[in-house]
Amino acid sequence: MARYVFITGGVVSSLGKGLASAALGAVLQARGYKVRLRKLDPYLNVDPGTMSPTQHGEVFVTDDGAETDLDLGHYERFTGRAANKQDNVTSGRIYSDLLAKERKGEFLGATVQVIPHVTDAIKSFVLDGNEDYDFVLVEIGGTVGDIEGLPFFEAIRQLGNELPRNHAAYLHLTLMPYIPSAGELKTKPTQHSVKELRSIGIAPDVLLVRCDRPIPEGEKKKLSLFCNVRETAVIQGLDVASIYDVPVAYHKEGLDREILAAFGITDAPEPDLSAWDEVSRRYHNPEGEVNIAIVGKYTGLKDAYKSLSEALTHGGIANKVKVNLQWIDSEVFERDDPAPYLEHVHGILVPGGFGERGSAGKIEAARFARIKDVPYFGICFGMQMACIEAARNTAGIKNASSTEFGPTKEPIVGMMTEWVKGNEKETRGAEGDMGGTLRLGAYPAQLTRGSRVADIYGSTRISERHRHRYEVNMEYRKLLEKNGLLFSGVSPDGKLPEIVERTDHPWFIGVQFHPELKSKPFEPHPLFTSFIAAAMDQSRLV
């Protein structure tokens, strides 16, 4: 039977619960255990799909088409296990499912309440489908004391009593701030956080204390005494140079040992962390560096492109080079010449996005890359803008545009109305719901034999994850191909374009999918590996 680790946070948000969960999962895997990670989000959105990237960060898409929290990206990157729809749930989804049942009369006239109905639904979600796993790590979003999080804390409290003995453990993350004027680390925020947690009936087994310098022994003893946690179970979470140093760092501090001890496990095999040591070695000992410009519209919050920046790092690890990212707001190119911003970079990446704002700047970035022979990687919206740029400036279609920006006589990019998923045809209308109505999840694509992308993948058949509502219009395919833009990847039925590449350029590729979602530090995505290799070649020319 699976054992459960419930991971909570206190004091402040953004302490790295998701990263700690992922790192703990990776180390338990390295000990030979089968691990699953889940995220409970207390907000009322049904999923993050309609939330602003600048407020909530990126939306991570799973193979089965779920729009999920970005922490699931960490889970996948660190454990290699593909997440699915059952690994992330929100208050919104819990409540909407409950209310749908209530409307159908499934509660037989009972009063529907937070306890037991909401908490039972949360518990059912946590426990479902774990038969094949040794450990299930369950992260609760937000911080202890949040009103919206109370049903989730109550649910995991109940589970602590309902599961067999030694089958539930609680890991609590807090912040230990350093006060320069006093010259010391302060324990009081952690004390208050644990007090809040204990007030709702949860006693942490392990404390993971985030800090920017080592915790003195006296302070560790103080935390142990006042938080009622064993001294060995007060784990310091020091800042590290790279997130890929975290599994080894937390293992050295004894995090996994103390978690196992909370379950009464003292004879677990030692972890094989050689893969993480190698990733860390390659990251910290680069043999060169490249500069990559990311021309996006959500650059104000780097988490909006979390998987993207990590995939570029993975490409650097594969090529043993340091990847320096230059974040550029695409709107800048609508008023300024791109040359001063881009002439020193070795690669240009234009990521996904929605809406017209910033699109003209992305088109300018694609134009600069095409003219100057700078490696160009367009992802989703970035591919669409590259096609519009090619239509306008190489095929002579001056009014080329996208129907996403309003009515146009030359719809190079148009809304998808139907596509095939498995054996079923899915359809969408322009006036439908915004949430969950995109082309979502993994779809196969057929690559042209002998094309650059077929060489990069080493195959003509691939599967990648999608999240989009608009597609490049295949009616313009012949005209664009006449002018150097090869449609080198299409859906198996040949109706939807998936990849374009320029035949007259050293490295110019646009993809309709999101390859960054499948990249891992120990298994970098081939497109990012190739893109960084092309950037290295460019660096020798600049």
Image: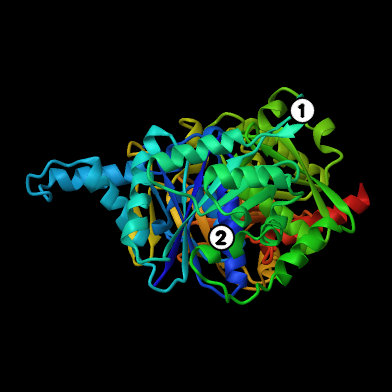
Residue 249 coordinates in the image, percent (x, y): 71, 57
Q: Please give left or right for residue 45 compared with residue 107 in the image.
A: right
Residue 521 coordinates in the image, percent (x, y): 68, 61
The residue carrying pointer 1 sits among few (fewer than 14), some (14 to 19) or many (20 or more) residues within 10 Å by Cα, namely few
Q: Which residue in the structure is indicated by mark 2?
A: 76
Q: Judge by depth and name the residue closer to the eye, 182 or 444.
A: 182
Q: Which residue in the structure is indicated by mark 1?
A: 180
Which image quadrant is residue 536 in?
bottom right
Using the rendered image of the protein, determine whether residue 379 is visible from the camera's viewpoint.
Answer: no
Spatial distance from mark 1 to mark 2, Cα to Cα? 38 Å
Circle on res. 136 = none
Tell me, what colour scheme is on the image?
rainbow
Q: Please give left or right for residue 404 compared with residue 276 in the image.
A: left
Q: Please give left or right for residue 179 compared with residue 225 in the image.
A: right
- Picture quarter with the N terminus: bottom left
Q: Judge by depth and name the residue closer to the eye, 129 or 427.
A: 129
Vertical position of residue 432 compared to residue 497: above or below: above
Q: Please give left or right for residue 222 compared with residue 142 in the image.
A: right
Q: Secondary structure at mark 2?
A: helix
